[in-house]
């Protein structure tokens, strides 16, 4: 079987396709024949040496956190899945439910020291698998583990989940933000999309966003968000930008609103956070790191109920995986970039 490794992680061109012995499942493990994998912005950071707490990623890492396929064999004592099941791996196999722990946070696939899923066959801890919603293809299912679960956790995983009639401001039209628009719409909430491109805003509206703001033409997009909410501000911000966008997100939020801090890499800033408006405006700034298996399963029930379909921008063949990375890096996409396997 074939898989990709990153002998070093400095450039997309470091991705190397290699042959390996097919793995065998041990106790508690399931062997999955991968049918699709999906890219996240994190994977660009991994491949170009911008990821990992100080130590970066291990030499020879198998990249990507997100993939789906069918179970072909299970080891002893596996009851959660059986051969033939259509499954996706969860982002952190160590985070099943409850609050995140240090140990769970260290299990993220395709980063740090943990191999990921850009391979024809992958061994998973069976507890780290979820069944795909029946109406989804493998390619659609592969988009769920990181971006979709992150958007779900932001909107529904916290102490004050999104309510019908509330408003959700999304930044850009990448993987996380498009899922947030779809979930907000399904929950009876109002999504306000932002993008640097009018054509992407039109597509975001077709997917359920009520309004669109072009942040390239209107750099003070928070003013537009305030105007669209009658001066009140939005209930939730899906903050995928970082230090460069956070001050505007703070101004866009209503008194008592919630800012879900998801990204730190897209919009550079001086890194300073002014606590005064957070305090005066009673805001909640909530850090998000993907989500647990419990959240993934709750999300899948909602996806099945509403027959939601992930938005796939483009699918690349396995042999052209580096082109998929380059496409994501170009940032012309809307939604998800997928690699077909097999
Ligand atoms: N904490 C977590 O658990 C978690 C999970 C997933 C993602 N993330 C982070 O969230 C961010 C988005 O991830 P993703 O995978 O959805 O990325 P993505 O698919 O690559 O989408 C990025 C989109 O963001 C928009 N954008 C780029 N620069 C921007 C800026 N300066 N201000 C506002 N919008 C900007 C662009 O949309 P337009 O072209 O429409 O303008 C771009 O297409 C990344 O930083 C990623 O690392 C974190």
Image (tube, grey):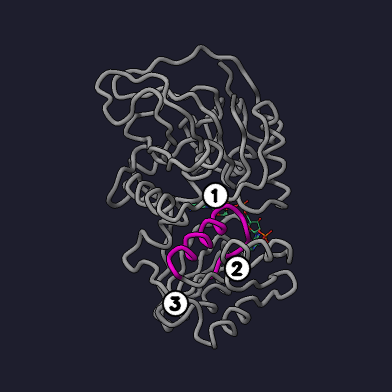
Q: Quadrant of the N terminus?
A: top right
**Image point (43%, 82%), residue name:** 255
Q: Position of residue 294 (x, y in %)?
A: 32, 47
Q: Secondary structure at mark 1?
A: loop
Could you tell me how far apart the alpha carbons at marks 3 and 1 are, in whole angstroms? Answer: 34 Å
Mark number, residue 200 = none
Q: Say if mark 3 contacts mark 2, CB within 8 Å.
A: no
- Point out the stretch of residues depicted in magenta: 169-188
Query: Is ligand 1 less than 8 Å from the beta carbon at label 1?
Result: no
- The majority secondary structure of the magenta stretch comes to helix
| Residue that carries the numbered disc 2 in the rendered image | 193
Identify the secondary structure beneath mark 2. Answer: strand
Residue 104 in the image, given as x and y percentages of width and height: 34, 42
Q: Where does residue 312 sit, x and y in percent of width and height?
A: 61, 46
State the SS at label 3.
helix
Is disc 3 in contact with disc 1, using a CB cutoff of under 8 Å?
A: no
Image quadrant of residue 269? Answer: bottom right
At x 51%, y 81%, the residue is 233
Q: Look at the image and say whether residue 294 sits in the magenta stretch.
A: no
Instruction: Out of 12 and 164, give the one closest to the viewer.
Output: 164
Q: Quadrant of residue 160?
A: bottom left
Is 175 in the magenta? yes
Is 314 on the left or on the right of 226, as rendered? right
On the image, numbered disc 1 is attached to which residue?
310
Q: Which residue is at 42% across, 63% downward?
A: 155
Q: Which residue is mark 3?
A: 278
Taking the view exactly as shown, the residue that stands out farthest to the left is: 77
Question: Quick check: 73 above or below 151?
Answer: above
Among the two numbered marks 3 and 1 on one chain, the one whose residue lies closer to the N terminus: 3
């Amino acid at each position: 079987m074939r898989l990709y490794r990153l002998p070093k992680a400095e450039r997309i061109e470091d991705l190397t396709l290699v042959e390996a012995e097919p793995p065998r499942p041990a106790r508690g493990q399931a062997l999955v024949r991968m049918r699709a994998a999906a890219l996240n912005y994190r994977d660009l950071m991994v491949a170009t040496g911008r990821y990992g707490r100080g130590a970066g990623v291990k030499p020879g890492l198998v990249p990507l956190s997100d993939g789906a396929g069918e179970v072909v064999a299970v080891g002893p004592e596996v009851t959660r899945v059986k051969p033939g099941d259509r499954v996706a791996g969860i982002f952190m196999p160590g985070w099943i439910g409850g609050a995140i722990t240090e140990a769970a946070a260290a299990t993220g696939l395709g980063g740090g020291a943990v191999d990921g899923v850009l391979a024809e066959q992958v061994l998973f801890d069976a507890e780290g698998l979820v069944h795909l919603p029946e109406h989804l293809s493998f390619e659609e299912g592969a988009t769920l583990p990181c971006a979709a679960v992150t958007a779900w956790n932001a909107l529904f995983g916290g102490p004050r989940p999104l309510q019908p009639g509330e408003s959700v401001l999304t930044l850009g039209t990448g993987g996380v933000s498009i899922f947030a628009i779809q979930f907000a719409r399904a929950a009876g909430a109002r999504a306000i999309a932002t993008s640097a491109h009018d054509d992407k805003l039109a597509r975001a509206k077709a997917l359920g966003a009520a309004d669109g703001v072009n942040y390239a033409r209107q750099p003070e997009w928070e003013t537009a968000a305030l105007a669209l909410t009658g001066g009140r501000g939005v209930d939730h911000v899906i903050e995928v930008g970082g230090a460069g966008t956070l001050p505007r997100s703070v101004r866009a939020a209503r008194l008592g609103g919630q800012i879900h801090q998801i990204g730190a890499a897209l919009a550079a800033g001086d890194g300073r956070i002014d606590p005064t408006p957070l305090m005066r405006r009673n805001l909640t700034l909530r850090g998000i790191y993907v989500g647990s298996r419990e959240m993934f399963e709750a999300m899948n029930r909602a996806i099945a109920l509403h027959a939601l379909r992930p938005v796939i921008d483009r699918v690349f063949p396995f042999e052209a995986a580096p082109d998929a990375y380059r496409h994501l890096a170009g940032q012309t996409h809307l939604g998800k970039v997928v690699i077909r396997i097999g």
